[in-house]
Image (cartoon, rainbow, N blue to C red):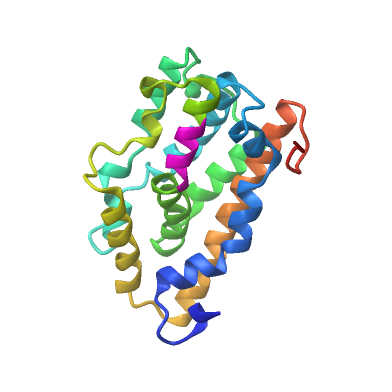
Amino acid sequence: MASDSPEAGTAAILRDATSAEHRSTENRSFIAALMSGQLDLEAYGVYLAQLAHVYAALESREPSSDEPWMLGDAALRRVPSIDADLAALGMPDWRSIRPLPATVAYAEHVRSLEGWLRPLAQHYTRYLGDLSGGQVVAAMLRRHYGATDAQLGFYRFDGIENLVQYKRAYRAGLDDLALTPLQQRELVEEARLAFRLNGAVFDALGETVGIGREPLAG
C-alpha cells in the first residue's frame, strides 16, 4: 500500500494498517442494528454507559509536558457529555451500572498502559472516531429514534470551532512525532487491539439484546 512508502506519514500508516479492524468493528451486529433503527434509545443508553467506563479510563491520565498535545486536550473530554446525555435519556448514572466483562477488560487495559505511545493509539481510535464517524451515528440516532440535542451531547465538541480543521491538525500532530519504524509498529499494534477491544464490547452488547456477532439481515 502507499502508506508503506518512506514518504507516508504516521497518520496514513495508522489509518491503512487498521482499516480491516475498523471495518470489522463497525459491522458488528449490535452497532449495525442500532444504526439501522432495529433497536431503541434505551439500547443506545446502555451502549453509552458501557463506553463511559472506557472514556473515564482514558481521561484519568495525567498528561505530561513531553507528550503529544492531543492527549491533554480538554476539548475532547467526553465523560461530562456522557453524564448529561444519560440524564436526558432517563438512564441511571453509568457509575451505578455494572460494566460488562468486555468493558472491564477494555477499561483495565487502558489504565494499565504506561508512557504515551500506546495511550495515543487508544486515544486515536476513540476520539478521532467520535470526530468522524460519530457524527454519522448522531444523525442516525436522530433519524431512527428521534434523539434530541440534549441526548446527543456526546457527539458535540463545543470547544472545537471546526471539526475538519481539528482532525487535520490531529493527523499532522501524529506525523510530526517523527516516530521510528519500531514505534510506528507499536502504535499500529495498539490501535488494532483497541478496535478488537471495542468490537468485544459490541459483541457483548449484542448478546444483551439477543443478537449475534454478525450483522442482522435486512
Q: Nearer the viewer, residue 188 or 11?
A: 11
Q: Is residue 19 toward the left or the right of residue 64 in the image?
A: right
**Quadrant the C terminus occupies:** top right
Examine the residues drawn in magenta and state their main secondary structure.
helix
The reply to whether residue 106 is visible in this rendering is: yes
* Rendering quarter of residue 148: top left
- Name the quadrant of the N terminus: bottom right
Judge whether 137 appears above or below 90 on screen.
below
In the image, residue 105 sits, relative to residue 70, either above or below, namely above
Q: Where is residue 213 in the image (x, y as percent from the top left)?
A: 75, 42
**Rendered image quadrant of residue 19:** bottom right
Image mark count: 0
Q: Which residue lies furthest to the bottom in this view?
A: 6
Taking the spot 47% from the left edge, 74% from the top edge, the residue there is 184
| 68 left or right, relative to 216 | left
User: Residue 190, percent across and down?
Assistant: 54, 62
Within the magenta stretch, is there residue 139? Answer: yes
Q: Is residue 63 visible in the rendered structure shown here?
A: no
The spot of residue 193 in percent (x, y) is: 59, 57
Q: Where is residue 182 in the image (x, y as percent from the top left)?
A: 49, 79
Say above or below: 208 vs 92.
Answer: below
The segment highlighted magenta reads 133-140
Rendered view: 129 above or below 181: above
The residue at 22%/59% (across/down) is 65
Q: Is residue 169 left or right of residue 20?
A: left
- Closer to the camera in the image, 142 or 128: 142
- Tell me the residue at 51%/70% (across/down): 186
Residue in view at x 55 percent, y 21 percent: 41
Membership of 71 in magenta stretch:
no
Depth check: give the residue in front, 94 or 161: 161
